[in-house]
Image (tube, helix red, strand yellow):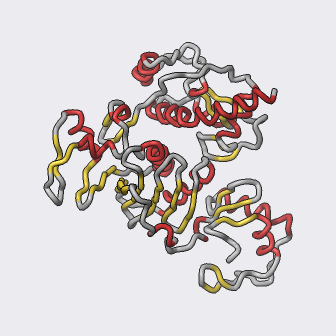
């Protein structure tokens, strides 16, 4: 299947393969049909592809293109080994699993492709991103236990803009797959638990390299990934790191605004953030309040409700751009039962990051009207 380019292949090319003779070699190995005389009719190909998507053997990037992670090249591209530009330095973050399946990096590839990241290259166990706001990012599996995030950034511009988005994507994937990972910052030959750094930063105490024994400032190590204002909003809950950061200003809009509907649909690339699957079109999309407009008091959410209200979010009338997601009707209904404050925090964080893009599109559509 040499027609695939880093796992991407057009649907019409798959139809050609299924309707004609089988390819002689796939990823440098010989293959043959199980039943050589079977040739699919064009109308059957759509069903075959739907089954492949259902079982996550491949993913739809758009109406014409599919992505098969298993068809990515096994070796990383030469660009992944290139030295960064002058004045940039590499900062390194690790997620440590008891077992890390390939599916984690494959799902991250899909989310990045769908959610407006600049994906330069993909290979079987990694991807390379170029980001408009500064850092170049490489995410790859070092082994079956370690996911490695390397960012080459200007020291004057922290890598937190892209890092927080990637971390959020990975934690959502971990939740979907029932996985947990400890988080580690690497500096030279030393590795530091992020939980330990956060606790040391809160106390104002120093930390020491596990190999070099050198004394370091915990806030400096964290500062490569988390801005100081974000560090103040981080909590450690049961050895898990919870990032809390809400916008300084909320933008109030009616959810019935047609320009808003179009802007939300396009900003999120027509994908529902709850399930990460496409919405057929914006007319069938529901504009969902992340924090419900008809909220019934729940003890589990009391602390988060107070946190919202203390930060300028009026929970009695939560008609804010930063509180809207484009959603399937079924996902909207399922989310209504959510009593987990950490899920609401993650969704609000995602919506807040997307807000500038939605606002730009909203202004454009309102001008057209």
Please report the residue visible at 65 percent of the width from the left and 58 percent of the height from the top: 59
Where residue 350 appears, as percent x and y from the top left, is 53, 37
Residue 367 location in percent, x, y? 77, 27
At horizontal 73% and vertical 22% (from top left) the residue drawn is: 256
Residue 175 in view here = no
In the image, residue 141 lies at what x, y percent?
43, 64
Q: Residue at x 24, y 61 (%)?
A: 189
The image shows residue 314, relative to residue 195, as above or below, that is: above
Q: Is residue 326 above or below residue 81?
A: above
Q: Which quadrant holds the C terminus?
A: top right
The answer to whether 212 appears left or right of 41 in the picture is left
Whether residue 63 is visible here, answered yes or no, is yes
> Is 193 situated above or below 120?
above
Camera-side residue: 88 or 49?
88
Left or right, residue 175 beside residue 234: right
Q: Is residue 263 left or right of residue 73?
A: right
Residue 265 lies, with reference to residue 147, above or below; the image says above
Residue sitting at the far top:
316
């Amino acid at each position: 299947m040499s027609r695939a380019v880093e796992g991407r292949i057009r649907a019409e090319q798959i139809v050609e393969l299924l309707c004609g003779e089988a390819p002689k070699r796939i990823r440098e190995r010989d293959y043959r049909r199980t039943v050589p005389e079977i040739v699919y009719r064009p109308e059957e190909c759509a069903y075959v592809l739907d089954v492949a998507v259902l079982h996550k053997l491949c993913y739809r990037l758009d109406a014409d293109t599919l992505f098969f992670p298993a068809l990515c090249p096994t070796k990383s591209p030469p660009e992944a080994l290139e030295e960064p530009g002058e004045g940039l330095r590499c900062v390194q973050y690790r997620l440590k699993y008891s077992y890390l399946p390939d599916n984690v990096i494959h799902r991250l590839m899909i989310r990045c492709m769908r959610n407006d990241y600049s994906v330069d290259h993909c290979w079987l166990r990694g991807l390379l991103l170029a980001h408009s706001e500064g850092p170049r990012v490489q995410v790859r599996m070092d082994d079956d236990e370690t996911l490695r995030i390397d960012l080459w950034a200007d020291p004057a511009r922290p890598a937190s803009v892209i890092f927080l988005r990637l971390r959020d994507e990975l934690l959502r994937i971990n939740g979907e797959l029932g996985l947990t990972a400890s988080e580690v910052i690497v500096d030279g030959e030393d590795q530091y638990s992020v939980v330990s750094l956060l606790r040391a930063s809160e106390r104002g105490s120093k930390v020491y390299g596990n190999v070099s024994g050198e004394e370091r400032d915990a806030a400096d190590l964290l500062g490569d990934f988390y801005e100081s204002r974000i560090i103040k909003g981080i909590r450690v809950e049961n050895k898990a790191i919870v990032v809390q950061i809400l916008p300084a200003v909320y933008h109030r809009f009616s959810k019935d605004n047609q320009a808003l509907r179009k802007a939300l649909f396009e900003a999120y690339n027509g994908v529902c953030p709850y399930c990460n699957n496409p919405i057929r079109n914006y007319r069938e999309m529901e504009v969902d309040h992340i924090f419900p407009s008809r909220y019934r008091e729940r003890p589990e959410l009391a602390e988060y409700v107070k946190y919202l209200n203390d930060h300028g979010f009026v929970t009695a009338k939560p008609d804010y751009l930063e509180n809207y997601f484009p959603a399937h009707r079924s996902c909207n209904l399922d989310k209504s039962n959510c009593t987990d404050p950490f899920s609401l925090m993650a969704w609000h964080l995602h919506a807040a990051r997307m807000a500038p893009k939605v606002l730009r599109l909203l202004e454009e559509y309102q001008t057209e009207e």
